[in-house]
Image (cartoon, rainbow, N blue to C red):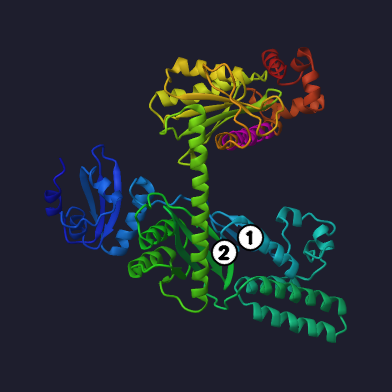
């Protein structure tokens, strides 16, 4: 039995991080404190009665408390965010790790290239961003091509051009590859683009206007017309986007709620321009305040991504230790504003509105998904607790590069991190054998204690596929998992699917309007997409490689000699065993091995 009084008595009045553990040693919750003794004691004070139901449920499971003393509250914040990322405690507010954000890049080449970049940053190039998504980067590239006509081709293409490409013909590039623009003029265009990306639009337009006047005065009217079009393109951007005129890069973060759904909206402002926004949906945020949700987001998000100089948040956070921690990580000062004015206030109001709208949409989607799940439970006579569904599909081209997919639906959403693909070694296009292989590999691990047990397994197909799945589950002893097959029906039209269930002679035909069938279609289509994607990747890889590469004893020189002698792979496949053995360096034994591998 956990003795909270004894544990608290041993804690110091120092800043640090505490971890609540259950009887199995699993981390239930990670928190930070300016005073460890006071903070941990507050959880166990009988008179408090202020804990949320979530925290009360956690305290019932606590078997031990571990602490780590730090030198400052800012250091405790950093340690807390690292521990939350590694342990993913079930009672902490958690935000899903996302991919790195994309940037717009101007390369360090003599004639810089404008491009899309994701990943680590190279000091030889200049980067602008980050942008919330790839679409925002590509839209900016198209804008800059129209306004400044900077090249986007790879250096390998640039150095081997002998004539201008199509982009030059449609006035999207000045063709520095073939010398149609001087190095100084091209660098001037790149400098103007960089100023524009930094938010100095007025300076750019003034410079372009001066160039236009100069060209016009010198009777270079074609050049003046080009510059005029550049100015017009930049002014169109002003009409479409609100630009604050403040140069400091800023992230604006707001929290919105609808029912039990919380959403955090992150808007990215770079050079005074709104580059776009992104929504995040935290887990374990029930009963948490907006301040708690936003603090958790700031900690976890900026552990992975560099913080800009300005962060505007829509709740009253204790900004001082957060600013100190973020500044140490970013290598520059970071200011967190909780009561912004002027342009920042307008950005925040927009972020709050977007967060509330997204939360409302998520709530509506959740209600729809819950209704569909309930209808499916009734259709297949499943218990109310049945929520996790796994679905299998097989994709191949006449037996080539067969791939089976397994997709997972749980917690009213597709769980992409749980998806799996299985490369199938079935050369004859035997869908039954492929399905058997995938099911056996997937659920042998489950029987061994790895992974979660699904409540329902769907297979794409008819009676044959259902029979295979039933046999596999009987062999593995998985008698408590429901099975069903989804057949396309006689007309093979969406909405006319038949659902086959073991032990039931007649197929279920719920109809296109049935919510349960709509959920089955959603999951089945995702399994189909995931299988085709894997099959195409595997097929492309196999077709881009030579079958000779898999034959032991046939290295690069022997492959080259064989292909040169017979004029390619087709000629090699048509060669006889004696012809293969006659090649220098290819003995009889190796010739037999090559012949059998190719036939």
Q: Is residue 442 left or right of residue 208?
A: left
User: Taking 202 as reference, is 317 above or below it?
Assistant: above
Q: Position of residue 19 (x, y in %)?
A: 26, 49
Q: Quadrant of residue 200?
A: bottom right
Q: Secondary structure at mark 2?
A: loop
**Cα gap from disc 2 to disc 1, whole angstroms:** 9 Å
Viewer-closest of 116 and 412: 412
Viewer-closest of 468 and 120: 468
Residue, disc 1:
137
Q: Position of residue 454 (x, y in %)?
A: 45, 30
The disc placed on residue 129 is: 2
- Please tell me which residue is depicted at 79% across the width and 14% down the height of the picture: 576
Q: Quadrant of residue 304?
A: bottom left
Find the magenta span and give its range.
522-540
- Please tell me which residue is depicted at 52% across the width and 23% down the height of the picture: 439
Q: Is residue 393 left or right of residue 490?
A: left
Q: Point out the image quarter for the N terminus.
A: top left
Q: Are marks 2 and 1 in contact (CB under 8 Å)?
A: yes
Crowding near the residue tagged with mark 1, few <14, some 14–19, many ≥20 C-alpha atoms within 10 Å:
many
């Amino acid at each position: 039995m956990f003795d909270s009084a004894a544990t608290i008595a041993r804690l110091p009045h120092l800043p640090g991080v505490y971890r609540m553990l259950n009887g199995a040693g699993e981390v239930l919750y990670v928190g930070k404190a300016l005073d460890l003794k006071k903070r941990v004691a507050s959880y166990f004070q009988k008179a408090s009665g202020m804990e949320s139901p979530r925290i009360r449920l956690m305290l019932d499971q606590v078997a031990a408390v571990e602490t780590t003393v730090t030198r400052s509250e800012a250091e405790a914040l950093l340690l807390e965010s690292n521990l939350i990322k590694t342990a993913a405690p079930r009672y902490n507010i958690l935000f899903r790790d996302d991919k790195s954000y994309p940037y717009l890049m101007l390369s360090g080449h003599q004639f810089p290239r404008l491009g899309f970049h994701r990943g680590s940053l190279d000091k030889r190039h200049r980067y602008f961003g980050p942008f919330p998504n790839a679409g925002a980067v590509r839209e900016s590239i198209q804008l800059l091509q129209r306004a400044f006509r900077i090249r986007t081709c790879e250096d390998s293409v640039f150095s081997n051009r002998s004539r201008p490409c199509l982009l030059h013909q449609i006035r999207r590039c000045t063709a520095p590859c073939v010398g149609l623009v001087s190095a100084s003029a091209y660098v001037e265009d790149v400098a103007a683009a960089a100023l524009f990306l930094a938010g100095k639009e007025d300076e750019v337009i003034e410079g372009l206007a001066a160039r236009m006047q100069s060209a016009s005065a010198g009777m270079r009217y074609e050049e003046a017309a080009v510059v005029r079009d550049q100015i017009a393109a930049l002014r169109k951007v002003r009409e479409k986007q609100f630009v604050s005129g403040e140069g400091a890069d800023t992230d604006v973060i707001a929290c919105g709620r609808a029912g039990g759904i919380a959403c955090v909206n992150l808007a990215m402002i770079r050079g005074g321009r709104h580059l776009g926004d992104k929504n995040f949906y935290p887990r374990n945020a029930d009963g948490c305040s907006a301040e708690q949700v936003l603090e958790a987001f700031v900690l976890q998000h900026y552990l992975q991504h560099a913080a800009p100089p300005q962060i505007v948040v829509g709740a009253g956070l204790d900004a001082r230790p957060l600013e100190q921690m973020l500044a140490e990580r970013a290598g520059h000062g970071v200011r967190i504003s909780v009561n912004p004015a002027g342009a920042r206030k307008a950005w925040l109001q927009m972020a709050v509105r977007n967060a509330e709208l997204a939360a409302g949409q998520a709530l509506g989607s959740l209600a729809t998904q819950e209704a569909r799940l309930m209808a499916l439970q009734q259709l297949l006579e499943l218990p109310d607790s049945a929520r996790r569904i796994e679905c299998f599909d097989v994709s191949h081209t006449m037996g080539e590069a067969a791939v089976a997919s397994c997709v997972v639906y749980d917690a009213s959403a597709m769980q992409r991190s749980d998806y799996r693909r299985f490369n199938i070694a079935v050369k004859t296009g035997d869908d039954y054998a492929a399905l058997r292989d995938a099911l056996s590999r997937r659920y042998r691990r489950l029987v061994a204690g790895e992974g979660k047990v699904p409540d329902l397994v769907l297979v794409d197909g008819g009676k044959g596929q259902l029979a295979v799945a039933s046999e596999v589950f009987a062999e593995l002893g998985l008698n408590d998992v429901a099975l069903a097959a989804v057949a396309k029906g006689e007309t093979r039209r969406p909405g006319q699917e038949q659902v086959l269930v073991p032990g039931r002679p007649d197929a279920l035909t719920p109809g296109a309007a049935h919510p349960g069938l709509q959920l089955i279609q959603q999951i089945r289509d995702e399994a189909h997409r995931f299988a085709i994607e894997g099959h195409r990747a595997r097929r492309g890889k196999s077709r881009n490689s030579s079958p000779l590469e898999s034959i032991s004893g046939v290295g690069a020189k022997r492959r080259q000699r064989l292909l040169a002698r017979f004029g390619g792979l087709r000629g090699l496949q048509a060669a006889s065993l004696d012809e293969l053995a006659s090649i220098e360096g290819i003995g009889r034994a190796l010739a037999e091995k090559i012949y059998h591998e190719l036939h």
